[in-house]
Image: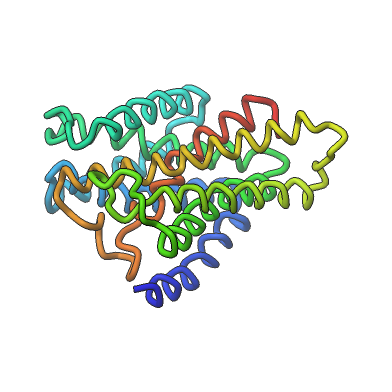
Amino acid sequence: MLRSRVITALMIAPLALAALLLLDASAYVLFIAAVLAVCGWEWANFAYLRGWSRIAYGLLIGLITSFVPPSAWWLWISLMTWVIAGYLVLRFPKYPATLRRPTPILALGVVVMVPAGLALVMLQSQPNYAANLFLLLGLVWCADIGAYFTGRRWGKRKLHPAVSPGKSWAGVYGGWVITLVFVLLWRVQTGLFGLSNWKVELFWLLMASGMVFVSILGDLAMSMFKRVRDIKDSSQLLPGHGGFLDRLDSLFSVAPILVLCLVYGGLV
């Protein structure tokens, strides 16, 4: 399992990074829209769609991402969506019947996936895009990888077994520590780090800590939807990982909120 995960990651990650860093603005939007179209196709399974209706929903997600102008409103909608998702995750396995109804699930998919895509488009328009993209991906990857390995080694006390039996508090702490180290190194590498203004560094560590828990929320929320639908993976498109949703769940939650902090909080 681990071997196939690593092989798939080594094949996909360089291609994705090349696209995110090298494509011009128009091609960039089309790339993001194409990825989200696949995610939409996977999400449609949560709403019990099949065949062409499932494909149509995926295309709809891609088209919305392609043609809707990026706006801070999408980021605020995303923030409210993840607050609601957090409430549902905390209450699980008690959940409203609407989570089994196609229409609310399909609407929820729009406000989960589209803001993440538009957040990346907004981020690309900023002058320090490469550094901030590295920050975004590093936050998500460090939280995920740190949680995976520390959870496997020391994970006895489970985080929320009703949603995800494999996740543990040890994984949370491990991902948190590794993420904080990454953020400090990112600050040093970008030339922004300075102990003379310790309040700024403390702020960045607090923001990074918040992003870790937002990342975990995205992961748990996706696990919750899969539990309600009674499936293990969103698809089998990525050997060892499941589907695109299984790999991008944390990015969906972190990207809009981080971009909201960076772009509209004046941090870029």
**Horizontal placement of 205 versus 142: left or right?**
right
Residue 58 in sight in this render: no
Residue occupying the point 45% across, 53% down: 171
Residue 220, percent from left and from top: 33, 43
Q: Is residue 81 above or below residue 212?
A: above
Q: Residue at x 48, y 30 (%)?
A: 69
- Quarter of the C terminus within the rendering: top right
* Residue name at image x 41 percent, y 39 percent: 65
Which residue occupies 25% across, 30% down? 91
Q: Can residue 156 be seen in this view?
A: yes
Quadrant of res 98: top left
Colouring chosen for the image of the structure: rainbow
Drawn side of residue 168 relative to residue 101, left or right: right
Q: How many labels does the image show?
A: 0
Residue 133, percent across and down?
A: 61, 48
Q: From what the image shows, is residue 70 above or below residue 181?
A: above
Which residue is more in the foreground, 231 or 16? 231
Residue 259: image location, x then y, percent: 57, 34
Rendered-image quadrant of the N terminus: bottom left
- The x, y position of residue 74, in whole percent, is 45, 27
Extreme residue toward the right, this view: 196
